[in-house]
Protein backbone atom coordinates (compact mmCIF):
# COMPACT_ATOMS: atom_id res chain seq x y z
CA UNK A 1 0.00 0.00 0.00
CA UNK A 2 1.15 3.50 -0.83
CA UNK A 3 0.03 6.59 1.07
CA UNK A 4 1.09 10.19 1.28
CA UNK A 5 0.71 12.92 3.86
CA UNK A 6 0.42 16.37 2.30
CA UNK A 7 0.82 19.38 4.55
CA UNK A 8 0.03 22.92 3.50
CA UNK A 9 1.14 26.40 4.48
CA UNK A 10 2.99 27.12 7.72
CA UNK A 11 3.00 23.47 8.73
CA UNK A 12 6.73 23.38 7.99
CA UNK A 13 7.01 25.40 11.22
CA UNK A 14 5.38 22.76 13.44
CA UNK A 15 7.31 22.52 16.68
CA UNK A 16 7.95 26.25 16.92
CA UNK A 17 4.72 27.66 15.47
CA UNK A 18 2.13 28.59 18.15
CA UNK A 19 3.11 25.55 20.29
CA UNK A 20 0.13 25.98 22.62
CA UNK A 21 -2.12 25.19 19.65
CA UNK A 22 0.01 22.88 17.51
CA UNK A 23 2.40 21.26 20.01
CA UNK A 24 6.17 21.20 20.20
CA UNK A 25 7.05 18.34 17.89
CA UNK A 26 8.54 19.06 14.45
CA UNK A 27 6.58 17.18 11.79
CA UNK A 28 9.68 15.45 10.38
CA UNK A 29 10.27 13.88 13.79
CA UNK A 30 6.65 12.71 14.08
CA UNK A 31 6.75 11.41 10.50
CA UNK A 32 9.77 9.21 11.33
CA UNK A 33 7.80 7.58 14.18
CA UNK A 34 4.84 7.04 11.82
CA UNK A 35 7.06 5.27 9.30
CA UNK A 36 8.30 2.98 12.08
CA UNK A 37 4.74 2.33 13.20
CA UNK A 38 3.65 1.28 9.71
CA UNK A 39 6.63 -0.61 8.28
CA UNK A 40 4.42 -2.50 5.85
CA UNK A 41 3.31 0.52 3.83
CA UNK A 42 5.09 3.00 1.63
CA UNK A 43 4.49 6.31 3.36
CA UNK A 44 5.57 9.56 1.76
CA UNK A 45 5.47 13.13 3.01
CA UNK A 46 5.18 16.41 1.10
CA UNK A 47 4.84 19.96 2.41
CA UNK A 48 4.43 23.21 0.55
CA UNK A 49 3.37 26.73 1.34
CA UNK A 50 2.11 27.19 -2.24
CA UNK A 51 -1.42 26.39 -3.36
CA UNK A 52 -0.29 25.42 -6.88
CA UNK A 53 2.38 23.03 -5.59
CA UNK A 54 -0.22 21.32 -3.37
CA UNK A 55 -2.54 20.92 -6.36
CA UNK A 56 0.32 19.54 -8.49
CA UNK A 57 1.10 16.98 -5.78
CA UNK A 58 -2.58 15.96 -5.49
CA UNK A 59 -2.63 15.39 -9.28
CA UNK A 60 0.62 13.44 -9.14
CA UNK A 61 -0.39 11.18 -6.23
CA UNK A 62 -4.10 11.09 -7.00
CA UNK A 63 -4.10 8.24 -9.53
CA UNK A 64 -1.48 5.89 -8.11
CA UNK A 65 -1.60 6.16 -4.31
CA UNK A 66 -4.11 4.29 -2.11
CA UNK A 67 -4.76 7.16 0.28
CA UNK A 68 -3.95 10.83 0.76
CA UNK A 69 -3.94 12.47 4.20
CA UNK A 70 -4.25 16.20 3.63
CA UNK A 71 -3.82 19.06 6.04
CA UNK A 72 -4.16 22.03 3.72
CA UNK A 73 -3.85 24.49 6.63
CA UNK A 74 -5.58 27.80 5.97
CA UNK A 75 -6.23 26.81 2.34
CA UNK A 76 -8.89 24.46 3.70
CA UNK A 77 -10.96 27.55 4.47
CA UNK A 78 -10.29 29.41 1.22
CA UNK A 79 -9.35 27.18 -1.69
CA UNK A 80 -11.94 26.17 -4.26
CA UNK A 81 -8.98 25.14 -6.46
CA UNK A 82 -7.79 22.51 -3.95
CA UNK A 83 -11.39 21.32 -3.48
CA UNK A 84 -11.63 20.89 -7.27
CA UNK A 85 -8.33 19.00 -7.34
CA UNK A 86 -9.63 16.54 -4.71
CA UNK A 87 -12.78 16.03 -6.78
CA UNK A 88 -10.69 15.47 -9.93
CA UNK A 89 -8.49 12.66 -8.61
CA UNK A 90 -9.25 9.00 -7.91
CA UNK A 91 -7.37 8.46 -4.64
CA UNK A 92 -9.53 9.06 -1.53
CA UNK A 93 -8.50 12.00 0.66
CA UNK A 94 -8.92 12.42 4.42
CA UNK A 95 -8.79 15.98 5.70
CA UNK A 96 -6.82 16.42 8.92
CA UNK A 97 -6.50 19.40 11.26
CA UNK A 98 -4.22 19.24 14.27
CA UNK A 99 -6.22 21.78 16.24
CA UNK A 100 -9.96 21.66 16.86
CA UNK A 101 -11.00 24.17 14.22
CA UNK A 102 -14.52 24.33 15.70
CA UNK A 103 -13.33 25.81 18.98
CA UNK A 104 -11.36 28.49 17.15
CA UNK A 105 -12.30 31.54 15.07
CA UNK A 106 -15.45 31.25 12.99
CA UNK A 107 -13.58 31.53 9.68
CA UNK A 108 -11.95 28.17 10.49
CA UNK A 109 -15.32 26.42 10.86
CA UNK A 110 -15.88 26.12 7.12
CA UNK A 111 -13.86 23.85 4.85
CA UNK A 112 -14.18 23.95 1.06
CA UNK A 113 -12.39 20.60 0.99
CA UNK A 114 -14.55 18.57 3.38
CA UNK A 115 -17.40 17.76 0.95
CA UNK A 116 -14.87 16.16 -1.43
CA UNK A 117 -13.07 14.14 1.24
CA UNK A 118 -14.04 10.76 2.65
CA UNK A 119 -13.87 12.24 6.14
CA UNK A 120 -12.31 14.80 8.40
CA UNK A 121 -10.31 14.48 11.63
CA UNK A 122 -9.90 17.64 13.66
CA UNK A 123 -8.57 18.47 17.11
CA UNK A 124 -6.78 15.22 17.92
CA UNK A 125 -3.31 16.67 17.51
CA UNK A 126 -0.72 14.87 15.41
CA UNK A 127 -2.52 11.59 16.19
CA UNK A 128 -5.04 12.61 13.54
CA UNK A 129 -2.54 11.63 10.83
CA UNK A 130 -2.04 8.18 12.36
CA UNK A 131 -5.80 7.64 12.65
CA UNK A 132 -6.29 8.60 9.01
CA UNK A 133 -3.68 6.04 7.94
CA UNK A 134 -5.38 3.39 10.08
CA UNK A 135 -8.70 4.18 8.40
CA UNK A 136 -7.18 3.64 4.95
CA UNK A 137 -5.62 0.36 6.13
C1 LIG B 1 -4.82 23.75 10.76
C2 LIG B 1 -6.01 24.65 11.11
C3 LIG B 1 -6.09 25.79 10.13
O1 LIG B 1 -7.20 26.65 10.46
C4 LIG B 1 -4.84 26.63 10.17
O2 LIG B 1 -4.90 27.66 9.23
C5 LIG B 1 -3.61 25.81 10.00
C6 LIG B 1 -3.53 24.52 10.69
C7 LIG B 1 -4.64 22.64 11.81
O3 LIG B 1 -3.92 21.69 11.51
O4 LIG B 1 -5.18 22.73 12.92
O5 LIG B 1 -2.65 26.22 9.37
O6 LIG B 1 -5.07 23.13 9.52
Image (spheres, grey):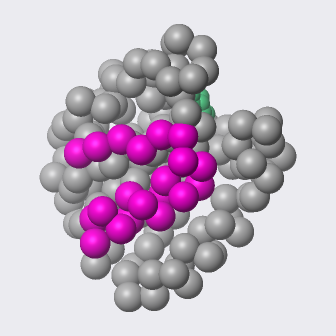
Quarter residue 76 falls in: top left
Query: Residue 128, how many percent across, how many down?
Result: 49, 53
Which corner quadrant of the figure contains ligand 1? top right
- The extreme bottom residue here reads 40
Tell me: 15 left or right of 98. Answer: right
Q: Residue at x 24, y 30 (%)?
A: 115
Q: Is residue 71 visible?
A: yes
Residue appearing at x 55%, y 73% in the figure: 34
In the figure, is residue 16 to the left or right of 1?
right
Task: Point out the image quarter for the C terminus.
Answer: bottom left
Q: Residue at x 48, y 40 (%)?
A: 122
**Toward which corner of the image does residue 9 lie, by quadrant?**
top right
Task: State whether residue 8 appears in this view.
Answer: no
Q: Position of residue 134 (x, y in %)?
A: 36, 68
Instruction: Judge by depth and name the residue closer to the eye, 52 or 83.
Output: 83
Q: Quick check: 73 above or below 28? A: above
Query: In the depicted view, which residue is nearer to us: 56 or 86?
Result: 86
Q: Which residues are magenta?
A: 118-137
Q: How many marks?
A: 0
Residue found at x 74% / y 58%: 26
Query: Most extreme residue toward the right, as rendered?
Result: 16
Asked if residue 132 is among those painted magenta in the image, a careful observer would answer yes
Q: Is residue 93 left or right of residue 44?
A: left
Along the viewing direction, whichever of 121 and 42 lies nearer the viewer = 121
Q: Residue furthest top?
A: 106
Between 44 and 18, the one lying in front of the other is 18
84 in the magenta segment:
no
Q: Position of residue 2 (x, y in %)?
A: 32, 74
Quadrant where the image shows the N terminus: bottom left
Residue 30: x %, y % from top left: 65, 66
Amino acid sequence: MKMIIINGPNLNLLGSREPDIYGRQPFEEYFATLQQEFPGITLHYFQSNSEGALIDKLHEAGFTYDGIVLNAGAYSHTSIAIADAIAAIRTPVIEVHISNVYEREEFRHHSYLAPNCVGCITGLGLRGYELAIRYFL
